[in-house]
Amino acid sequence: MGAIITLTTDFGLNDGYVAAMKGVIYSINPEATVVDISHNIEPHNIREAAFIFSTAYNFFPSYTVHLVVVDPGVGTNRRAIILKTPKAHFVAPDNGVLSYVIDTLSPQPMPNSGRVTLGADAQVYAITKSEFWRQPVSRTFHGRDIFAPIAARLSLGMMAFSLGDRVDTVTTLPIPHPHRTADTATGQVMHIDNFGNLITNIQENIVITTGQPVNINICDHTIRGLVPTYAEGKGLIALFGSSGYLEISLPNANAAAFLKAGIGDEVTVKPGGN
Amino acid sequence: MGAIITLTTDFGLNDGYVAAMKGVIYSINPEATVVDISHNIEPHNIREAAFIFSTAYNFFPSYTVHLVVVDPGVGTNRRAIILKTPKAHFVAPDNGVLSYVIDTLSPQPMPNSGRVTLGADAQVYAITKSEFWRQPVSRTFHGRDIFAPIAARLSLGMMAFSLGDRVDTVTTLPIPHPHRTADTATGQVMHIDNFGNLITNIQENIVITTGQPVNINICDHTIRGLVPTYAEGKGLIALFGSSGYLEISLPNANAAAFLKAGIGDEVTVKPGGN
Amino acid sequence: MGAIITLTTDFGLNDGYVAAMKGVIYSINPEATVVDISHNIEPHNIREAAFIFSTAYNFFPSYTVHLVVVDPGVGTNRRAIILKTPKAHFVAPDNGVLSYVIDTLSPQPMPNSGRVTLGADAQVYAITKSEFWRQPVSRTFHGRDIFAPIAARLSLGMMAFSLGDRVDTVTTLPIPHPHRTADTATGQVMHIDNFGNLITNIQENIVITTGQPVNINICDHTIRGLVPTYAEGKGLIALFGSSGYLEISLPNANAAAFLKAGIGDEVTVKPGGN
């Protein structure tokens, strides 16, 4: 079956690790279509992987299998999971790397646990049935020996319940949402992209009054008003980007370098005008 | 249909942008074969994209769809086009990123416009029929929302005329061709490759007298004569490379770093000997 | 036929060279599945290519065609070969880039030659039949003009003997194996991976007495004992990694940067305890 399997890892593109995973996948499902999302996640950076994955996975066809392996706890007792939704299967360590996906699945927090239960549309399975893994299983590369074989079998149409045991909860990381007072929305920089654009967590619906002028503050700079595209305006500009988030950009240049901005930097939106 | 779609962008390999485009393509044509040419074009560098694309596209089979998205004007009134030739379809912003392709299609300049008309073998279509785009269309990521769906539909066999409106002209950037006086050909460095080889715009037919000795000057260095391969000669060498252009190379080392050479540096070829 | 072709080169991901090879492959076998192992081998570094390739090729299905092009001698009289084993075809310059594969094929050294003969299971063919190459053949890019067409034809089921002439010997580089005295095993760092892990050439069977405590010395640091996973232990740790080699790691950090370690640095394993 020609199902799609996407890969997101922190393995980089210099080593043979990604190819070893692909070799295992094609050995089980020669008809799979394997698509890289990114392998340049900063090593062990679960939050970055979660964010970048969130900007891409939703554009794939139904029944895609998404494999996300940023797994600093490999070989310890951290759980490996399959998350099944009506649209896709997600195969990953249970460490929060799927947090943005989970955020769309009606999560209900379990107090003091960093874990949530999900709405009726989604099911979580602990990957437990070792007869479906590559043997012998390395203690340091479950991407190759456990996750890749499980993703390949899902792409062949095997059911998640035959590969693992249903569990009730899943780990999620707190996703920083913007907060607002009477006249100010305060968010933060979530990601800096290849162009140096600063992508914030402020979505279009939080901006104070649609169509009214706003001022955006970041790193002691004030940007007056929003523009529709990267090519308009002079100096620093602010606009809503392709993932629906407020972005700060510098036309034909690198806003992050200009501002010396970093992940987590505060961004505020206030009424502007005059 | 298993048609090939190539991708050339300045999106880099860290973000999810390339994968979002691939997800859109596979959602429309699950049987497409998607091949990366390069995603490491310098951001907004249309000339670099045009050159690198020119070294690869011609090796693909007939009916390949080539998608080139280096698009600093995204969301403005710059046109998006399909260029149809007897061998392939090219989908790109109308900003000159296809200049080397156009240079092979009998272009006739329109005075003072940066635009050309093409010979009878090639047709240009403005991408206008929004019912074939991904909706809603972001103003900042037409690669995902317009170009990828159009490329996918072409790969399914849809005709260019059903996706857009025929137009007469297309934008091209001036391609620097070498010039020659009585005894000297003068060109420039067009590209520095992964090995540090300096690739010029001087082709084999411009070299003064085939088989006669020549001296090549670059960055205050003189190279006497041509060698057939990278492994021959000592110190700096000059040879005709795999794209037919004169290259300056340093065996087992990086000529660009050694010479502190850059794009646009002048290269001359004169009669040598004795 | 949907056979797999893997690619390992030092061409990098910025230029169009890898894509040109893929275009040639798909022009001959549109049904091939092309998988990148790595294109970020250091330019001309045959040893690095040989090592990285060795960590990935064995995970691919039977009948995979492996194309390895790190070829500083391109265009000279170095031989181009097909190595056929019961499991796969390998297409490469005859310069040692397949040394780790050859090491598994009962090699018998030819004195003072850097060449070996192989056991009965493996055959070597010189690539000689130019009617199966892309014409005209560049003297500087045999990856595109000779190796890619040959790999594509093998993936279509053509026999190696119809593409070249059987030869008796193949070039191999000396692979540094660890040596041991009464109580000490001495090896070296073979590779530094994307995480900064130092991968040595010491395999599990050389460690002195299974289950007994050991001390590992590297760069004037002593590591006491082995741990099972990257997440256990404090400070520098040592463990057997996914390719079966002893690795030195620093949890959630970069051991190579911390130790200022490099390829070839000595690693010793001695009895520990108390």
Image (cartoon, coloured by chain):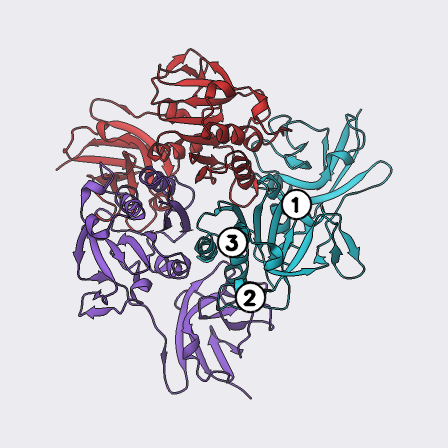
Chain colours: A purple, B cyan, C red
What residue is shown with label 2? B130
Give the distance between the C-alpha atoms of the residues marked 1 and 3, in whole angstroms: 19 Å
Q: Which circle's residue, 1 or 3, is located before the other in the chain? A: 1
Look at the picture and state if A171 lies above or below C155.
Answer: below
The residue positioned farthest toward the left in the image shown: C274
User: Looking at the image, how many numbered discs can be counted on the residues?
Assistant: 3
Q: Label 1 is placed on what type of residue?
A: Pro
Q: Are marks 3 and 2 on the same chain?
A: yes
Q: Is residue A56 visible?
A: yes
Taking C102 as reference, is A135 left or right?
left
Image point 47% across, 24% down: which residue? C158
> Label 3 crowding class (10 Å Cα cut-off): few <14, some 14-19, many 20+?
many
Is residue B95 something one can see in this rendering? no
**Which of disc 2 and disc 1 is earlier in sequence?**
1
Q: Which mark is residue A204?
A: none
Alpha-carbon span between mark 1 and mark 2: 26 Å
Residue labelled with disc 1: B86
Q: Which residue is mark 3?
A: B152
Looking at the image, tell me whether mark 3 or mark 2 is earlier in sequence order.
Answer: 2
Badge 2: chain ID: B
Q: State the SS at label 3.
A: helix
Classify mark 1: helix, strand or loop: loop
Left or right, B248 with respect to A3, comes to right
Give, as a three-letter code, the residue at label 2: Ser
Q: Chain of mark 1?
A: B
